[in-house]
Each structure stands twice: as structure tokens, then as C-alpha cells.
Image (cartoon, rainbow, N blue to C red):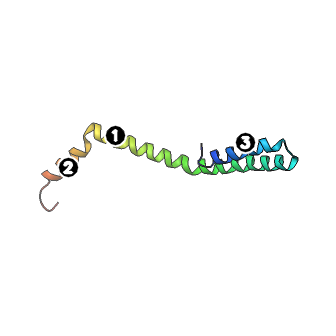
Amino acid sequence: MGLLDRPAAALTGALSWLGRQGTRAVAISILLGVAGAVLGGIGSMFSGPIMIIVLAMMYYDLRIRKEAFDLQLMLEALDAPPGS
């Protein structure tokens, strides 16, 4: 669910109540519903890949910590001869 879905849905719901009052409010309600769907899709298009990247980074971090790979690299750096 995108960041812009909730405000658009709230406006659409409020205007749907007003839609019972006249056809202009119905047209505005439909327009806001379409705009909310488009903006929600655009928001998901940007937030989806960022979420996947964050989850992949968390996975690799946990895996490196679990296997103590970071400690192994630090120990190899300490045991390295000077100048290398």
C-alpha cells in the first residue's frame, strides 16, 4: 500500500457521501478515486524496490553476523604481515 493511498481513499469516501447530493460531487468522487489509484501505483513503484533492497541488506547482515564472517576478516587483517 502506497503512501498516497490512505488520503485519497479518505477523500473518496467523504465525497461519496456528498455524491448522494448531486452529480458534480459524484464526478469529483470518481476523479479522486482514479487519481488515488494512479498516485498509489506511483508510490508503490518507488517504495517497493526500496523495501526489497532493505530486506536484502538485512538478510546479508544477519547472515554475516551468524557465520561470524566479519570477525574472520578482522582476524585476517590483524595477522597480515606489514606492508601488504
Q: Tag 2 or tag 3, which sits nearer the N-term?
A: 3
- The residue at the point 63 percent across, 51 percent down is 42
Tell me how far mark 1 sits from mark 2, CA to CA: 17 Å
Q: Badge 2: few (under 14), some or many (20 or more) residues near its Cα, within 10 Å?
A: few
* Location of mark 3 (residue): 13
Q: Nearer the viewer, residue 26 or 44?
A: 26
| Quarter of the image with the N terminus in it | top right
Q: Is residue 38 left or right of residue 58?
A: right
Mark 1: which amino acid?
A: Leu
Residue tagged 2: 74
Indicate which label's residue lies in the foreground, 1 or 2: 1
> What residue is rendered at 74% in x and 49% in y?
32
Q: Tell me the crowding category of disc 3: few under 14, some 14 to 19, or many 20 or more residues within 10 angstroms, Cα based.
A: some
- Which of the two discs, 1 and 3, labels the residue nearer the N terminus? 3
Residue 62 sits in quarter: top left
Q: Of tags 3 and 2, which is closer to the observer?
A: 3
| Type of amino acid under label 2 | Met
- Closest to the observer: 11 or 62? 11
In-image side of 65 versus 35 (left or right): left
Q: Amino acid at mark 3?
A: Gly
Residue at 12%, 56% in the rendered image: 81
Mark 1 lies on residue: 62
Nearer to the camera, 33 or 56: 33
Q: Earlier in the sequence, mark 1 or mark 2?
A: 1
